[in-house]
Image (cartoon, rainbow, N blue to C red):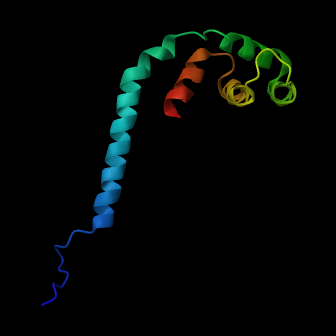
Amino acid sequence: MAILPTSKTIDPIVIGRTSFYLLSALLFAATLGIYWRTLKYPYIQDDCIVMNSIATMGPLNAIKAAFLAFDAAIYRPLATLYMAAVYTLYGTDATGFHLLAIVI
């Protein structure tokens, strides 16, 4: 005898989506809870150097230089790309840098 669906049948896809969204929200809350204090910290180590070069050269020129300078002391083209995006959104404010890092 086959079991016919009734109005009380629970759709597993809806449960899966709900669990996914709940787990995502919990993960984001845990990450924010752990890293919220970094929002008040300044840039550290070589991030100051990279951010100052982006501020001096401009974001597009800094990205171009980051991808073309193979003999540079610091070769981090993706980090420079990220920091250029941060500079475009927040300027030289380290709070925006840390906030975007938490969200990503």
Q: Position of residue 19 (x, y in %)?
A: 30, 52
Answer left or right for 87 relative to 104.
right
Q: Residue furthest bottom?
A: 1
Quarter of the view holding residue 52: top right
Quarter of the view holding residue 79: top right
Q: Position of residue 77 (x, y in %)?
A: 75, 29
Decide: is 29 above or below 7.
above
Viewport quadrant of the N terminus:
bottom left
**Which of the two residues, 104 or 89, is positioned nearer the viewer here?**
104
**Which of the two residues, 26 or 73, is positioned nearer the viewer here?**
73
Q: Position of residue 42 (x, y in %)?
A: 57, 9
Answer left or right for 7 relative to 90.
left
Answer left or right for 27 relative to 4.
right
Q: Residue sitting at 80 percent across and 29 percent down? A: 63
Q: Residue sitting at 18 percent across and 85 percent down? A: 4
Answer left or right for 79 relative to 73.
left
Decide: is 59 above or below 18.
above
Q: Residue furthest front?
A: 71
Quarter of the view holding residue 91: top right
Decide: is 32 above or below 95.
below
Q: Residue sitting at 48 percent across and 15 percent down? A: 38
The number of discs equals 0
Q: Position of residue 13 (x, y in %)?
A: 33, 65
Q: Residue sitting at 87 percent across and 29 percent down? A: 68
